[in-house]
C-alpha cells in the first residue's frame, strides 16, 4: 500500500487545532472533531456558557466525549522514544505551541482564544522557528560577508605595513650611505682647507719672523750707535780734535751715514 503523504505531513495533520501540537490524549466530540483532553478541559473551565466546538461551533458535551483510540494509536506509533515533553503554559497547563507576534512570547492555544493575547496575531511555533532560522542564516551570511571584507582590509593593511617597513629600511640605508659619502667628502675638504690655512700661516709666520729678526738686528745696531754717540758726547772740549776724527769715522758707517 503506497502512502499518499510523508511522515512530516502526517504529523502536521495530527495536530490539535487548539494548541497546534500533536494530539495528547485526543477526545472525539459529538461533531466528529478531535482535541486534546487537556485543551478541552481548559476551554471548558474558562467558558461560562455551553461548550461549542472551536471549528464547527456546534454545541457539544465535553464530559461525554470518548477517547479517539485510533488517533491515539497512530500518534503513539509515530512518536520516537525519548521525545521531550513540550513546555506548558503556566495559566492553562497547555503546550506553548504559538508565538504572539505583538508581545514576542510563547503562548498556548487558549491564551490566543481567551487570554491576554486574544485578537493578537499568532503564529505556530514551528513556523516561527523556521522563519527565525532563515533570519539567523541570513544574519550569519551577512556577518560572514562583513568578516570577509574585514579580513581583506586586514590583509591590505598588513601588506601596506610590510611594504612601508621595507621601503623605510631601503630609504634608511640609502640615507646612511649618502651621508657617509657626504661625511667623507666633507672630511676631505676640511683636511684640504686646514692644510691650506696651516701652509699659508706657516709662510706668513716665516716671513714675519725674518722681518722681525731684521728689525731686531737694526735695533741692536741703533742701540750700539746711540751708545757710541753718548760716549762721544761725554768727552771734554780739550779732546775736540780726537772727537771730530771719531765722529767722522762713525758717520762714515752705513748705519749712521744718513744722520751725518
Image (tube, helix red, strand yellow):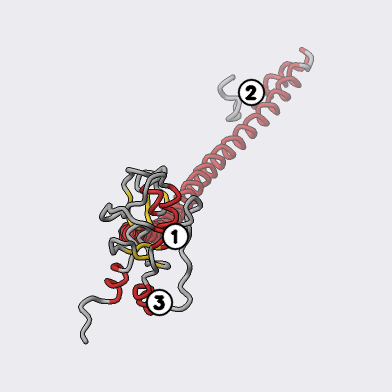
Q: Earlier in the sequence, mark 2 or mark 3?
A: 3
Against 74, is 220 above or below? above
Q: Position of residue 147 (x, y in %)?
A: 36, 59
Q: Earlier in the sequence, mark 2 or mark 1?
A: 1
Using the numbered discs, state the Cα–Cα distance from disc 2 to disc 3 in whole angstroms.
169 Å
Q: Position of residue 194 (x, y in %)?
A: 51, 47
Q: Earlier in the sequence, mark 3 or mark 1?
A: 1
Q: Are marks 3 and 1 in contact (CB under 8 Å)?
A: no
Q: Which quadrant holds residue 55?
A: bottom left
Q: Which quadrant holds residue 244?
A: top right
- Residue at 33 percent across and 50 percent down: it is 122
Q: Return the residue nearer the eye: 82 or 60.
A: 60
- Residue at 74 percent across and 16 percent down: it is 233
Identify the residue under disc 3. 76
Q: Return the residue nearer the eye: 116 or 46.
A: 46
Identify the residue under disc 1. 38
Quick one: SS at disc 1?
helix
Q: Which quadrant holds residue 216?
A: top right
Quick one: SS at disc 3?
helix
Q: Residues within 10 Å of mark 3 (few under 14, many from 20)?
A: few
Q: Position of residue 118 (x, y in %)?
A: 36, 44
Whether residue 92 is visible here, answered yes or no, is yes
Whether residue 150 is visible here, answered yes or no, is no
Against 77, is 120 above or below? above
Q: Residues within 10 Å of mark 2 (few under 14, many from 20)?
A: few
Q: How many marks?
A: 3
As drawn, the residue found furthest toward the top would be 237
- Residue at 30 percent across and 67 percent down: it is 12
Question: In which quadrant is the C terminus drawn?
Answer: top right
Amino acid at each position: 500500500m503506497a502512502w499518499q503523504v510523508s511522515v512530516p505531513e502526517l504529523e502536521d495533520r495530527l495536530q490539535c487545532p487548539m494548541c497546534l501540537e500533536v494530539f495528547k490524549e485526543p477526545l472525539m466530540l459529538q461533531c466528529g472533531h478531535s482535541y486534546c483532553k487537556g485543551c478541552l478541559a481548559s476551554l471548558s473551565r474558562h467558558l461560562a456558557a455551553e461548550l461549542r466546538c472551536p471549528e464547527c461551533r456546534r454545541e457539544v458535551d465535553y464530559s461525554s466525549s470518548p477517547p479517539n483510540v485510533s488517533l491515539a494509536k497512530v500518534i503513539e506509533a509515530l512518536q520516537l522514544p525519548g521525545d521531550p515533553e513540550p513546555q506548558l503554559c503556566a495559566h492553562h497547563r497547555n503546550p506553548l505551541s504559538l508565538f504572539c507576534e505583538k508581545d514576542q512570547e510563547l503562548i498556548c492555544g487558549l491564551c490566543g482564544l481567551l487570554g491576554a493575547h486574544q485578537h493578537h496575531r499568532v503564529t505556530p511555533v514551528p513556523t516561527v522557528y523556521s522563519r527565525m532560522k532563515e533570519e539567523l542564516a541570513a544574519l550569519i551570511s551577512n556577518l560572514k560577508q562583513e568578516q570577509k571584507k574585514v579580513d581583506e582590509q586586514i590583509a591590505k593593511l598588513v601588506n601596506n605595513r610590510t611594504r612601508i617597513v621595507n621601503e623605510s629600511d631601503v630609504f634608511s640605508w640609502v640615507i646612511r650611505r649618502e651621508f657617509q659619502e657626504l661625511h667623507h667628502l666633507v672630511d676631505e675638504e676640511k683636511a684640504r682647507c686646514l692644510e691650506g690655512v696651516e701652509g699659508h700661516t706657516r709662510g706668513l709666520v716665516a716671513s714675519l719672523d725674518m722681518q722681525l729678526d731684521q728689525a731686531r738686528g737694526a735695533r741692536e745696531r741703533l742701540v750700539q750707535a746711540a751708545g757710541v754717540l753718548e760716549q762721544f758726547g761725554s768727552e771734554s772740549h780739550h779732546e775736540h780734535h780726537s772727537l771730530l776724527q771719531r765722529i767722522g769715522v762713525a758717520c762714515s758707517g752705513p748705519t749712521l751715514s744718513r744722520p751725518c
